[in-house]
Amino acid sequence: MLNDIKWLFFDVGSTLVDETECYNHRIRDAIAGTDITFEEFNEKRLYFSKQNLKGDIEALRYFGLAKTPWHHEDEKLYKDSENVLKILCEKGYRIGVIANQSAGTEKRLESCGLMKYIQLVVASAEEGVAKPDKRIFDIALKRAGCSPSEAVMIGDRVDNDIITANEMGMMTIWVRQGFGKYWTISDESEKADFAVDSLSELLDIF
């Protein structure tokens, strides 16, 4: 199976990029001027995440708060992101991105120094379709010129990254980072071929 792999497709948020401070900033903005503490909000966010829901969105709804702007300036790479991509490229793998992101994903990846390792970026804002819709995976595979059996999907979200890729016949790797790590596997369709707790562990697979 591994011998057939040519392309490794990565998600961005909570996979290559640590968005912890982005979410924390959004929480602080949302609760400003209220009696709700950061700890109270975070406790609810964790509670909903463990129910396989979007924790931040459900917590906002629970407290009756409005969704606040996303601060891209708070994004930072996980400490192993660049080195892992570099080594995988040196091993001959082609690197792609399939991500639900706002416009300008390629530019942001360029600014943080990752685009020199990435051959293809397929992002929802530019394509008009988002994961888990099968069409965004089809777009990526077609542009890469590879079959599902020659590709791997690597991401933190079981609902967005793993289930559809499994259905399509791609190899899947669940990266248990961010709040996606709290997902409870309850069905065979949700099981990835591999689960890792950091990107560095990919080097034990490939």
Image: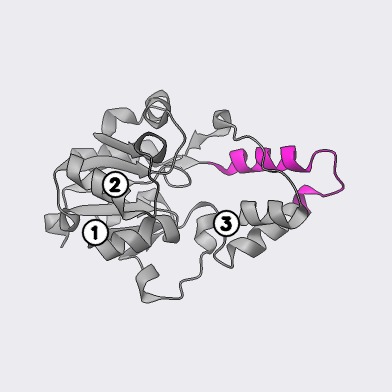
Residue assigned mark 3: 54
Query: Residue 83 location in percent, x, y?
Result: 34, 38
| Secondary element at image label 2 | strand
Residue assigned mark 2: 9
Say whether disc 3 or disc 1 marks the residue closer to the N-terminus.
3
Query: Residue 8 location in percent, x, y?
Result: 25, 47
Instruction: Give the numbered dot on residue 30.
Output: none
Residue type, mark 2 in image: Phe
* CB within 8 Å, label 1 to label 2: yes
Farthest residue, direction bottom = 187
The prevailing secondary structure element of the residues shown in magenta is: helix
Which stretch appears magenta?
19-39
Residue assigned mark 1: 170
Residue type, mark 1 in image: Met
* CB within 8 Å, label 2 to label 3: no
Q: Is residue 32 a member of the stretch shown in magenta?
A: yes
Q: CA distance from mark 2 to mark 3?
A: 23 Å
Residue 6 horizontal side relative to residue 65, left or right: left
Residue type, mark 3 in image: Lys
Look at 61% across and 39% down and name the residue there: 21
